[in-house]
Every structure is written in structure tokens, then in C-alpha cells.
Amino acid sequence: MKIIDEIILYENPDPLLVSKQGIFPGIVKLQDNSLLALFTIGQAFDSADQRTFVSKSFDDGRSWSKPKPLHNHKYKNKEESESLKPLLLQNNKLLAIGYAFVRPDSLTPIVNPNTFEILPLNNKISISNDNGESWSMPKNFNINETPLEISGPCIQLKSGRILGAAPPFHLKESDHSGWIIYSDDEGENWSKLSEFYKSKEGHISTWECRLCETNSKIIVIFWAYDNKNKKNLSNHVVISDDNGKTFNTVIDTKIRGQASNVMFYKDDIVFTIHCHRENPTGLILRKVDVRDNKFSILDEINLFSKDGLSSDDTNISKQFGSLKFGQPSILLLNNNELLICFWCIHDNQHIVKTYIVNI
């Protein structure tokens, strides 16, 4: 594998005049082979004014249109800072699914540094019927009265069912689990299908869940964090043989990564990508064989590594507040090229960056 191109999808065009930080990207390929990216722009990494923006590419990610707001909406009572990821349905309808924190004012942080309490969170969905040119105002949806960290894109199975993977969003020492959620009516109604992982003591979080469908399996990868002992664990993977209803024994990948992603390639081969925020740091793309519920690395490449990328791992709140890159994704452009997308800090600005990798 080798990098053949490096592109900045978004950076603040006027950094000396205004703060516009770009984070949390997600990309889909549309029916006409153009690419659509959703990402968040706000004054700061946790600012209350964060909104989802849309950009498109018509040349396989080599250039991108000027971002425009997903929707010029105003939330009724209090500001909400949002993050949404795109999903293209089989009928070419687009969904943007994620969450928004309810902000009492512009200076109250998302996580209380003393109590670890998190601001109220609403799960959100928006719909486009015109290839992403216009979108409905994001509306709330609720699953078991539980706010969920839907930080990655949902997927649509061959059956038409929509699946998502997400943990209940809280920072307690216990009561952590990873949920599979589903919708059978294109996102109108949602329910909990199963739990893909829960430790015996409930002290391990399943942050930044990502999932994919292979020819016969559902694979979920997640950032495992031990809240009891306040430390990162290796990335974990779980595999389902029945479309997400049940999962096999968890696989410890032995990869010391945090935010990660997974993409089905062919047969029993997937590509995974991992943010390594503990030394040695980097953004590592891996080609993996998952046959027989194993995780066998076939090839790997470190795409992004430089000094100063590590996070403060004193506790999970400090980790969230000291991130310098994250939310990587993988998109197959053609048989030989992958588009890798993530956010990172560059010249003191949060930007959205991509690599095109020949595989």
C-alpha cells in the first residue's frame, strides 16, 4: 500500500479573521459516482455553534466544493451543537444521522470537569431527496429514552434494514455497553436490536463504534476504554452471523488504537484504520483477514505520524479534551484506491484531511 495523493478537504479560508474549525467528517459515494462529505464547523472544538456542512467532489476526491450548511435551521429553545454522518439508501435517498448536545450557553463545557456529567444529548436525523442539495431540518429521535453516541455512519443491509452501532453516552465508571440499533422504515422509527458488547462489570466503554456488512457477517470495531482503571485498551472487534441479533466472543485485536473504522473489501478481507494516540502515535491503515472469527493483519501503512499527536490519558474527560486527530473513515473509490478521511490539527487549526491510497 502507498499514498498517491494528499488533499485538504476543508480548512478555514480566513484564519486571521475568524475561527472556523472543521471536524468529524463522513463521506459517501452517490449513484452518479460523485462524493458527498458531511462535517462539522464551529468556532472551537467543543463550541456551542457547531453545525453540519456539506461539500461535494466530482473527481474522486481530488477537489471539493465550498462547504455549505446542511440546513439553515435554528433550534427553538437552546443552542445545539451537532454532528451528523451520511448514509445513502438503496433508493438513493440520503440520511444524515448523529447527535447534538443541548447547550445552556456558549461557555458551559460538554463535560463537567469535576463531576464528569455530560450535557443533555438529542439523537438527530435529516433527510435529502435530491442528492444532498437540500436537507430537512434535523429532528430528534429517541431509543429507550437513552442518549447514544452515534458518532459514525449507519449502514443499510442488503435486506433494507438500517443498522447503527453506538454506546449510551455517559462517563460513569460502570453501566457501559455497546448497542445495535435499527430502523425498518428508512429512519422514521428506531429500536434497540441487541448489545454487541458488555463487560462483566460494565466498566468498559465502546467509544467511536463503526460497523460494516460483509458477504455474510456484521463486523463492529470500537475504542475500548476501561473506566474503572482509567486506561485505554486495545481496539476490540465483534462479529455477528445473524445480521446483528447476536455476536460472537469479542476479539482483542492487540492494536493499541482508539478511534477506528472498518470497511468490507471482498471475501474475508476488510480494511481497518486506527488512531494511535499513545506513543508510538499515528494513523495506521491495515488490511485484515477476518475468516473464522480471527483478526489476522496482512498489510499495514502509517499514513499520518508526527511529534505531539498523543493525548492526555489521565482520564477520559481529559482525553476527549486533548484530541489532535480522529474519526478516520475508509471509502473504496475503485478496485485499487481507497479514500481515507479524518480531522486533525494543522497550523493550530482543525482541518479535514484526506489521503488517497493505492492498495
Image (spheres, rainbow, N blue to C red):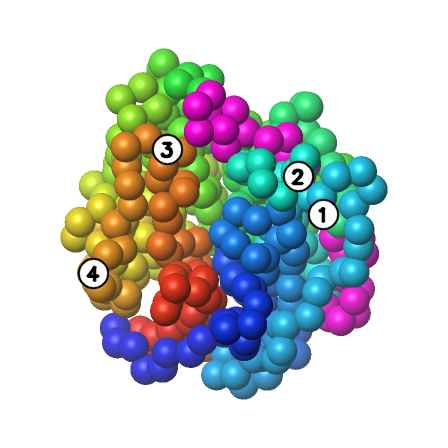
Asked if the magenta segment contains residue 126, the reply would be: yes
Q: Residue at x 75, y 49 (%)?
A: 138
- The secondary element bearing badge 1 is classed as strand
- The secondary element bearing badge 3 is classed as helix
Work out whether mark 4 precedes mark 2 in sequence or the reverse, and give the earlier one: 2
Work out whether mark 2 precedes mark 3 in sequence or the reverse, and give the earlier one: 2
State which mark lies toward you, 1 or 2. Answer: 2
Q: Which residue is disc 4 drawn over?
A: 307
Nearer to me, 357 or 110:
110
Nearer to me, 324 or 215:
324
Tag 1: residue type?
Ile
**Residue range corresponding to the magenta coloring:** 111-137
Quarter occupied by the N terminus: bottom left
The extreme left residue here reads 280
- The secondary element bearing badge 2 is classed as loop
Mark 4 packing: few (<14 Cα in 10 Å), some, or many (20+)?
few
Labels 4 & 2 near each other (Cβ < 8 A): no
Q: Which residue is disc 3 drawn over?
A: 316
Q: Is residue 286 left or right of residue 168?
A: left
Q: Where is residue 147 shown, x and y percent of the image? A: 62, 30
Q: Residue at x 59, y 83 (%)?
A: 58
Residue 289 numbered tag: none
Residue 125 numbered tag: 1
Work out whether mark 1 precedes mark 2 in sequence or the reverse, and give the earlier one: 2
Q: Where is residue 268 shown, x and y percent of the image? A: 35, 54
